[in-house]
Image: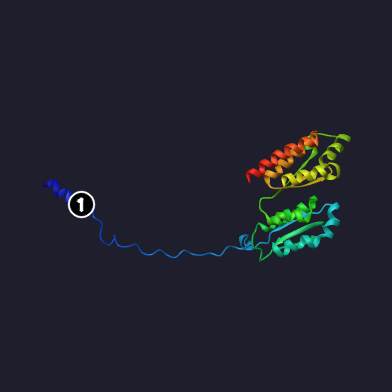
Amino acid sequence: MESNQATSSSMEVETVPSEMNSAPASLPTKPKFEPLMAHEMSDGRVQFRKVSVPPHRYSPLKKLWLDIYTPVYEQMKIDIRMNLKARKVELKTRQDTPDVSNLQKCADFVHAFMLGFEVIDAIALLRMDELYVESFEIKDVKTLRGEHLSRAIGRLSGKGGKTKFAIENATKTRIVIADTKIHILGSFANIKVARDSLCSLILGSPAGKVYSKLRAVSARLAERF
């Protein structure tokens, strides 16, 4: 009997009051915040970028200034000007700049033009996120001097630029050969394929062998996507 009384008393203790069983109170409404503008992210501070203009790109920049200015100012909402004294293109954010990353995209676009890419090719950096510019020198691959260096540059471009165009079309990239420097614009995977082909040519592979390897690699890339 005593054990039954003990269990009944413990049961009484464990019983939950009927008030607790009632439906929970309604939660407060979730606040809705508007997305921050670029100038609000940086506490109202204006952000700057400066891109140096090499002497040989000064005339093309002057000729194609409107083609560069229009997409940067009107579409990306970034202020742009040419500082004639410092010979630099200066970029800065505005009150109505929609995204803080637009400033860096515009700086990459202008820098690509300075490296020697056409405006219509470089403008892809503003439109797409996964494009990069990679640069390297011939001496990074192999130390060449005199006529050997000249022949290597000739192998890279081919007769009338045929080899360079073939690599560009097969890998969906754009290549600039400026003396001993090589710049490649494209996606990460495509840059790797183009760079491997160019390195093979620098090391002395004949163009025909590079073409056949390119055909196989570009077919694999096409299957993947």
Which residue is at the front of the view, 157 or 183?
157
- Tell me if I can see residue 79 in this picture: no
- The residue identified by callout 1 is 11
SS category of the residue bearing label 1: helix
Asked if 24 appears above or below 154 in the picture, the reply is below
Q: Is residue 146 left or right of residue 172?
A: right
Q: Is residue 30 left or right of residue 171?
A: left
Q: Amino acid at mark 1?
A: Met
Quarter holding residue 91: bottom right
Q: Residue at x 66, y 41 (%)?
A: 220
Which residue is at the front of the view, 101 or 170?
170
Position in image of residue 68 (x %, y %): 77, 60
Give the number of marks. 1
In the image, farthest residue toward the left: 1
Asked if 149 appears above or below 169 in the picture, the reply is above
Asked if 144 appears above or below 134 in the picture, the reply is above
